[in-house]
Image (tube, rainbow, N blue to C red):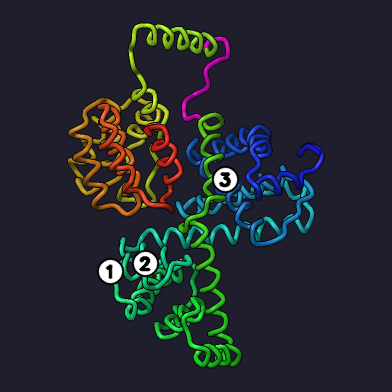
Amino acid sequence: MSPENNDQEYIEGLLHHTPVIVDSIYQRFATKEKRFILQKGGSVRDAVHVFEEALMDIYFYARRHPITVSTFEPFIMLLCKRIWEQELERRGQRIAGLEAEENAALTRDDMLDVEDVLKEGEKRRLAHNAYNQLNDNCKDLLRLSLTDTLQEDIAVETKIPVSNLPTARCECYSTLFRDLSTKLKGNNTAKEDLLSSDRFLSGQMSDTEKKEFDARMKTDPALNQQVKRFFLFRQLLAQKICPDPDRDAMQLQLFNHRNAWFSPKESTPTPIRNLVILIAMVAAGVAVMLYVSPWHKNIYRQFSSTEMQIPAIDSLRLPEEAIQQFNHGHFQQAVVILNKVLVTNPGNLYARFYRGVSLVDVNQQSAARNDLVTVYNNSTELRFEAAFYMGLSFLREGNKQECLDWLLKIPPGAPNYIKVQKLIEELR
């Protein structure tokens, strides 16, 4: 039975990352979602992010809970709108009446499922963002601790003695939950309780300790609630940062659909586009016949596309003109504007990152690397994007090994990890 006749197949198709179902979802809903985001003040990159987050939220939720929908289109559209609403709130903006047109088409159970999927997805995003703010040692320790890795192997990998691992993990989790509690307006867990909860959930308590802690939870509702919250966030974080071939396969499918449905460039009228395609095919044929090898340029163009985003911090706001020039591919003009920004505010890492990206595109690789290395060493948020464009700067010069060296600095769980792995496959 096709998805047109059974909307529940969309959920099953996402759960099992079935290519034909994922393709059908993009064909039927991606353009509508993109149109909505653009009408509500977002960019194409915002539309990509929201659509992919919505699909991954459904995917992760369906792996943990049974979910049934009566009509998929209003379900996915309302979820996208809710995610965008939360993103706008983070940016200090609001839009009203997002779901009015969808309410009539959704059952009460559908509405409750949308809210449940959204709440779990938002917690996952918060947990992952908090994780990305940790230092590299904590990231490695928590990532290894959330797998089945033996404590002795974790000790070797992290260079922390086995006896010190619980305390080290507790310090990392304490930092993580301090940030989460602030955003969720919850109470911080005492370090002693956090340490005990971690050992309890990790199976590192003796039978006697486990019985005592279990008995304490039954008589202490606050502790019981904190352990449940800790357990949930451990699971949600593991979904993002631990090795998972099924998740990676799903994300790779989304990545492969990205350029087809969310091109940042304005659409070219069909007759002209067809002519351009024909000319490109002829040019490619001529290149082959003349023994010209444009492989590295083609790969660069395939993976270099990005769009300038507006930072949430007011002091880092970038000029509207710079955003327009960059997003229209006028990189030399963008460099001129960003130069002025950095003269007055040399610590603006967003401006430095986008200037570095622009310089890569205009083939000023040495200057680009100066910017990108600075961002890599000083920005948690842009660190792995900077590493990616460092790799591309060497790719433009045909230096595959240096490119790979930088790409391999980007760990599993990084926002651009799937794109990085795809590029590594192309290079090898």
Q: Residue at x 63, y 57 (%)?
A: 61
Label 3: which secondary element: helix
Q: Quadrant of residue 132?
A: bottom left
Residue type at numbered disc 2: Leu
Q: Residue at x 57, y 10 (%)?
A: 271
Where are the magenta residues, as a range?
Answer: 263-272
Q: Which residue is mark 3?
A: 250
Percent coordinates x, y for residue 254 in the rendering: 55, 40
| Residue 351 magenta-highlighted | no
Q: Residue at x 31, y 64 (%)?
A: 137
Which residue is more in the foreground, 18 or 216? Answer: 18
| Residue 265 magenta-highlighted | yes
Q: Quadrant of residue 154?
A: bottom left
Label 1: which secondary element: loop
Q: Quadrant of the C terminus?
A: top left
Which residue is more in the foreground, 422 or 263? Answer: 422
- Residue 159's disc number: 1
Which of pointers 3 and 2 lies earlier in the amino acid sequence?
A: 2
- Residue 141's disc number: 2
Q: Residue at x 34, y 66 (%)?
A: 138
Label 2: which secondary element: helix
What secondary structure is the stretch in magenta mostly built from? Answer: loop
Which of pointers 1 and 2 lies earlier in the amino acid sequence?
A: 2
Which residue is more in the foreground, 92 or 360? Answer: 360
Percent coordinates x, y for residue 257 in the rendering: 55, 34
Position of residue 336 in the picture relative to residue 278 (left or right): left
Tell me the crowding category of disc 1: few under 14, some 14 to 19, or many 20 or more residues within 10 angstroms, Cα based.
Answer: few
Residue type at numbered disc 1: Lys
C-alpha distance separating marks 3 and 1:
34 Å
